[in-house]
Amino acid sequence: MAIPKNNRMIPHAKSMRKNMTKEERHLWYDFLRYCTPRFRRQEVIGNYIVDFYCHQAKIAIELDGSGHYEPDAAAYDAARTAYLNTLGIEVYRYSNADINYNFQGVCEHILFVMESCGTHPSVTFGDSSPQGEP
């Protein structure tokens, strides 16, 4: 099944890629960009943008800052998760605190989830600094 995409959201997704949070940058530059199968960041799916998406494993990874725990945001997140689930996409949420204080545990869990999906993940690290910064 092809994943639907609202093309009007692409410019916003591109902007979000350029303005990732500190936690999103950490997860992307220090782990996800080295994973196989590949992840995409700020991926448009339907009328939503997910933080990270692996098409082969059919998983979305969302990083939740404090704003996600407000009632309106929680309801929005629940609706988005329900929609993604109808497409066969499982959503895994990690708090910013998880990224900041348990990064290795988050990475291990993502690999476990990918393995559970039958994708046989691998990680090949290169220069882990964001865009070649020291």
Image: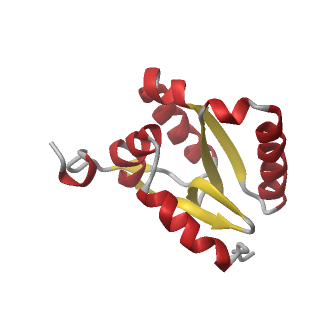
Q: Residue furthest top?
A: 101
| Residue 60 image point, x, y percent | 63, 51
Q: Quadrant of residue 46?
A: bottom right
Q: Residue 84, relative to residue 91: is it above or below?
A: below
From the viewer's perspective, tell me whether residue 80 is left or right of residue 124: right
Please count the marks in the image.
0
Q: Quadrant of residue 27?
A: top left
Residue placed most toward the observer, 53 or 63: 63
Residue under the point 30% across and 50% down:
124
| Residue 59 image point, x, y percent | 64, 52
From the viewer's perspective, tell me whether residue 120 is left or right of residue 34: right
Q: Residue 134, relative to residue 37: is it above or below?
A: above
From the viewer's perspective, tell me whether residue 91 is left or right of residue 83: left
Residue placed most toward the observer, 87 or 134: 134
From the viewer's perspective, tell me whether residue 1 is left or right of residue 60: right
Residue under the point 66% across and 41% down:
92
- Image quarter (top left, top right, bottom left or bottom right) of the N terminus: bottom right
| Residue 64 image point, x, y percent | 62, 36
Q: How is the image coloured?
A: secondary structure
- Image quarter (top left, top right, bottom left or bottom right) of the C terminus: top left
Asked whether the viewer can see residue 9, the reply is yes
Asked whether the viewer can see residue 37, the reply is no
Residue placed most toward the observer, 1 or 79: 79
Residue placed most toward the observer, 71 or 109: 71
Residue under the point 65% across and 37% down:
93
| Residue 21 image point, x, y percent | 46, 43
